[in-house]
Image: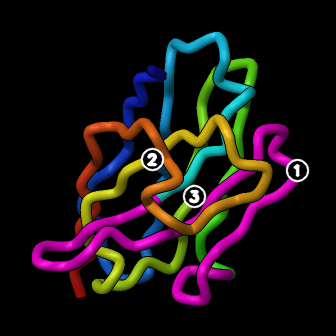
Amino acid sequence: QVELVESGGGSVRTGGSLRLSCATSSRAFSSFNIGWFRQAPGKVREFVGAISRSGAEAIYPDAVKGRFTISRDNGKSTVYLQMNSLKPEDSAVYYCGADDSSSYLSIETGTYGAWGQGTQVTVSS
């Protein structure tokens, strides 16, 4: 089971930026699609984006498209979530998940078999 560690969260004002990281020591990192999700208090975990094993493909929901960008460095076993033009509604705990079996990029939490502990993002107006 791959272990993931998120970092980079913090508090910013509306319009600010943050870069989250999702790292692992697993040598099989390049065999995983990686998804980013977020969960605000009292809400279900929400899809934020995903990136393919090679990094050639990424998908995003409309809520973050054009503001968030996912990239990965397989040599460093790390995936990044660059978040720009942040809004208060982006405030949540952000999680990354690993999918080692799908041939497509999934938006469903159940597809991802391993999760990190999460990192808090707070955006104030």
Q: Residue furthest left?
A: 42
Label 1 vs 3, first from the N-terminus? 1
The CA span between labels 2 and 3 is 13 Å
Callouts 1 and 2 close, C-beta under 8 Å: no
Mark 1 = which residue? 56
Residue type, mark 3 in image: Gln
Q: Which quadrant of the figure contains the N terminus? A: top left
Q: Measured from the top left, where is residue 66 in percent x and y?
A: 68, 81
Write the residue at 59% across / 42% down.
99
Q: Is residue 33 left or right of residue 45?
A: right
Write the residue at 60% across / 89% down.
62
Q: Measured from the top left, where is residue 110 in percent x and y?
A: 44, 56
Mark 2 = which residue? 96
Write the residue at 63% across / 62% down.
106
Write the residue at 51% across / 79% down.
85
20 or 23, nearer to the observer: 23
Callouts 1 and 3 close, C-beta under 8 Å: no
Q: Which residues are magenta?
A: 37-65
Q: Measured from the top left, where is residue 79 in percent x and y?
A: 60, 39
The CA span between labels 1 and 2 is 18 Å
